[in-house]
Amino acid sequence: MTETLDPDDWGAFARAAHAALDRAITETASLRARPVWRPMPDGVRAALRQPLPQQPQALDTVLDEAWQTILSYPMGNTHPRFWMWYMGASSLTGALADFLAAFDGSNLGGGNHAAAETERQVIDWLKEIAGFPSGASGTLTSGGSAANLIALTVARNEAAEIDLRAEGLAALPRPLRFYASDQVHGCHQKAVELLGLGNRALRRIPTDAACRMDIAALAEAIAEDRRAGWQPACVIATAGTVNTGAIDPLPAIADLCRGEGLWLHVDGCIGALARLSADHRHLLDGMERADSLALDPHKSLHVPFEAGCVLIRDPQAHLRGFALHSEYLDPSARGIAAASWLLDLGLQTSRGFRALKIWMMLKEQGVDRFGRIIGRNIDQAHLLAARINGEPRLELLAPVTLDIVCFRYNPGGLDAEALETLNTEIMMRLQEAGTVAFSDTTVHGVHGLRAAICNHRTTDEDLDIAVSSLLATGDALVSGGLTAQDTIFQ
Ligand SMILES: *Cc1c(COP(=O)(O)O)cnc(C)c1O
């Protein structure tokens, strides 16, 4: 018999696969009863430092090992009380779709097949959600970072007064300048660095007390740069900053970009999908005027990683940025190559079938339910902020706009350094206890903790558990009730 990668015994494969699926379902159903996170024992770490496997093993054996080691120590973001950074909580339907996408096996570089059509369908749906015209272009990406990079590439090329793809940056008559608020996500710095413009080309504009871009400072910066010989190219507005969830003044920025002839890119990785919430949609007014938009289905849609999306209003500009003519990829009149290539819309040639999980989840849940859940998370952030405002030992550090709350435990009488040490310790203890996962950040120079409630499993009771364990841990640390803590104020 010819050796292949298929099972020798299909029946045994089916039993192992069904058991794995059953276990994933059981564990997801009982997620709430487990700690948010637990540290990996040394044995598990050691189990992941083994030599290259030379000989085959039964799938059962491999699965057993995966469950005991890898799958028992996840990051924790599927748990209802994981609120670090800004992540999705995943979904079993999405996981099933990822399996089926791998089973289908199609390469989404393009071609004449249903998987490629599914991506086109999903892009059309995402355009509708974002308020973009049906004629706009778009592509699914690994995430928001790749989506923003693609958009900034198109913005750079369109702004250049030369054929940048042919001539390169050295031929630019004037250096290009991009603008974003001082709250901009780090992926934009990586993008301008990768685009050869350098971090200097990304001018950070100060923000107001609510962490929104100061529009007068933006106008002034553009005028100053023009006088100094820069070529202003693009404003990156953020709809939902990663620090506090602030939304830049989108209509005013859109007006300014139109007046100045600048490309408007909106980083909507956190906020764009809040357009699905009838109660909060108005917060995103003006976003639909962007030339390009990045959004992130693996955040508020809880699609398993990875799934991001970039939309570009002018489809020709998108193609001018990435399309190539390769003779080995000439479309044919009929057959498998009788289609435009999706690889002409981004960096990758081979591409995974990310569209299926978005397609299946939107079909199964419907957008209204996603809107209600996104709206509930925002309401929960306001609720948490109200609880914080009502507790003398807790302090809110930034206004709440979307589903992010920045705060700190502040018993009074401690300086900034001691407060930072104390809050960091509280954060780590709550993680180690598996109670609640907060992250930390610094807002306009003040360090604090942060809850990003982008989680379809979070209930209002989870907020109560979080506040009471936060207070109990802080109180115990301050009163010296926790011995290992004696070190923190020395
Ligand atoms: C998450 C995020 C990104 C990066 O997206 P990834 O999906 O993590 O690559 C960019 N911008 C903002 C505002 C984000 O919140």
Image: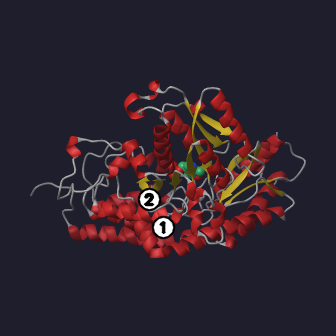
Q: Quadrant of residue 134?
A: bottom left
Q: Measured from the top left, where is residue 47 in percent x and y?
A: 43, 49
Q: Residue furthest front?
A: 259
Q: Quadrant of residue 447?
A: top right
Contact check, label 1 and label 2, Cβ < 8 Å: no
What residue would you read off at disc 1?
91
Q: Residue furthest left?
A: 1
| Secondary structure state at the residue bearing disc 1 | loop
Q: Measured from the top left, where is residue 143 in percent x and y?
A: 48, 52
Q: Amino acid at mark 1?
A: Ser
Task: Kindly report which numbered mark, 1 or 2, lies closer to the viewer in this rendering.
Answer: 1
Observer-nearest of 221 and 369: 221
Q: Quadrant of residue 165?
A: top left
Q: Amino acid at mark 2?
A: Gln
Is 308 on the left or on the right of 103, as rendered? right
| Secondary structure state at the residue bearing disc 2 | helix
Q: Measured from the top left, where is residue 63 in percent x and y?
A: 36, 60
Here the colouring is: secondary structure
Observer-nearest of 362 and 136: 136
Q: Residue at x 9, y 58 (%)?
A: 1
What residue would you read off at disc 2?
68
Residue 214 in sight: no
Observer-nearest of 321 and 425: 321
Is 72 on the left or on the right of 266, as rendered? left
